[in-house]
Image (cartoon, helix red, strand yellow):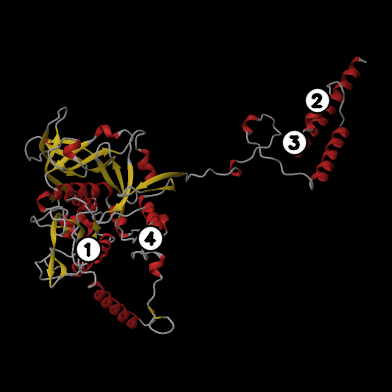
Amino acid sequence: MTTSLQDGQSTRGRAAARGLGLAQVCGAAQGRGDASALAARPPGLPYSTREGAHFCSADRRKKKDLNVLEMPSIPNPFPELCCSPFASVFSASLFPKANSRKKQVIKVYNEDGTSRALEVPSDTTARDVCQLLILKNHYINDNSWTLIEHLPHIGLERTIEDHELVIEVQSNWGMEEENKLYFRKNYAKYEFFKNPMNFFPEQMVSFATETNGELSQAPVLQNFLSSSTYPEIHGFLHAKEQGKKSWKKIYFILRRSGLYYSTKGTSKEPRHLQFFSEFGSSDIYVSLAGKKTHGAPANYGFCLKPNKAGGSRDLKLLYADEEQSRTCWVTAIRLLKYGMQLYQNYMHPCPGRSGCSSQNMSPIRSISENSLVAMDFSGHKSRVIENPTEALSVAVEEGLAWRKKGCLRLNTHGSPTAPQNSSTNLALHRAQPWFHHRISRDEAQRLIIQQGLVDGVFLVRDSQSNPKTFVLSLSHGRKIKHFQIIPLEDDGEMFHTLDDGHTRFTDLIQLVEFYQLNKGVLPCKLKHYCSRIAL
């Protein structure tokens, strides 16, 4: 009996094991908790194979009935916390991906104090910001608009290169620093690609491949852009001695590996050269008020500042004796740091997300200017002039009629004969973008320097010494020259002249238009006017 009882118990145990295993398989296949319910039955209660099959078939029927009405199962957000083998684990690909282009608000200022807040993605470049402001304000896109980084607490500013990310530039600012982004024109931004010899004087530049001491325009830029050559800029600069407040004039050498100074006169021997700074992880800035801010011996300063937060403590300040020398150093550092990227920015002014192509590089005007057509209003009904020759002749006639009407506004400042015309004439002058009312000589020079010392950059302003005259401030040969516009009276009529009356103009508008087309007594034609635009 004992043996038969043990045999019966073992037989029932094997059947229970088979039934439990079948129930577990069915439960796992259905993804439900029925197998757990079976497993929870008291161990003394016997199982049979028929019972396991009954449970499995019931599960199948129940699942089949619910297939139509059952909602899809909800993804388990924490699969790693579920230890049950029956829990469904979902792939991470079913979850939505995080948007990597986070947006951030930046504030862009202008010279007249106006500003505009822009919400831009994290991958927005300086070129993208300029294009956006150009389109919003209907400006002409002539590839001279620039984003400027201004650091007022240390008196420095720099041109943000077109390919640089604006958000990265702002991330290097300190929390307590009142730094700003300015939107202005800079005609000299890529001028060195057009006239390299104006930026690199022969006495400051030498190359390892130089032959017979002769340099032409093409090799100058090719040597800077090519990695196989070794351009070198050398000259004297004022530097502050380490641990002292005094400044010393030292001979510096700029190479691809960095900036060095000589400990023995103008010697370039390796044993006499000391490393001063590298520019791979630094940005090049221009000093705005060196004598006032840093007590420098000259005004033409530049600075190498590490492009990291808190980098203001590691400034490398240097000052040149003249503007041409500073421009040469700054331009050479830009070329050695960015290389072909600068050339690509110059050749393809509208790459990337801005939506422009190399085929659309002509100046972009506003929609209203692009949609202008020639009209004829001489008849009973107006008509569009479709013939280009006829449209040109009509434009010439309109111009001549405008010239005749211009004779009515003859007088300018303080004429006792026509005070009403004088006020109208003055209002016309002040409405011109190139006219700057009541700015000083120093302010005019600062404005021209900011917008680039390129031949032909000009503005017209009131004269401080003689309130009845005007002054034409013009950039030529990397210097700023000032020409007095003298009022001249003839037969009761007032004119303006720059050449003692040989060429006379009824107003400043005619004078500017004439010298934009003719050189005359000026060293060059008027090409780019300095303006203070509002955002």
The picture quadrant where one finds residue 122 is top left
Measured Cα–Cα span from mark 1 to mark 2: 93 Å
Measured Cα–Cα span from mark 4 to mark 3: 68 Å
Q: What element carries label 4?
A: loop
Going from the N terminus, do you reach mark 2 or mark 4 first?
Answer: 2
Q: How many marks?
A: 4
Which quadrant would the N terminus be assigned to in this image? Answer: top right
* Above or below: residue 60 compared with residue 479: above
Evaluate if marks 1 and 2 touch, with contact meaning CB atoms under 8 Å apart: no
| Residue behind mark 3 | 28
Horizontal relation, residue 95 to residue 106: left or right: right
Going from the N terminus, do you reach mark 3 or mark 2 first?
Answer: 3
Name the residue type under label 1: Lys
Q: Which of 172 and 496 is in front in this view?
A: 496
Name the residue type under label 3: Ala
* Above or below: residue 76 compared with residue 123: above
Circle 4 residues within 10 Å: few <14, some 14–19, many ≥20:
some
Circle 1 residues within 10 Å: few <14, some 14–19, many ≥20:
some
Evaluate if marks 4 and 1 touch, with contact meaning CB atoms under 8 Å apart: no
Q: Nearer the viewer, mark 1 or mark 2?
A: 1
Residue 40's disc number? 2
Circle 2 residues within 10 Å: few <14, some 14–19, many ≥20:
few
Residue 527's disc number? 1
Measured Cα–Cα span from mark 2 to mark 4: 78 Å
Q: Is mark 2 on a helix, strand or loop?
A: loop
Residue 427 x %, y %: 27, 61
Q: What element carries label 3?
A: helix
Going from the N terminus, do you reach mark 1 or mark 3 first?
Answer: 3
Name the residue type under label 4: His
| Residue behind mark 4 | 138
Residue 385 x %, y %: 39, 81
Name the residue type under label 2: Ala
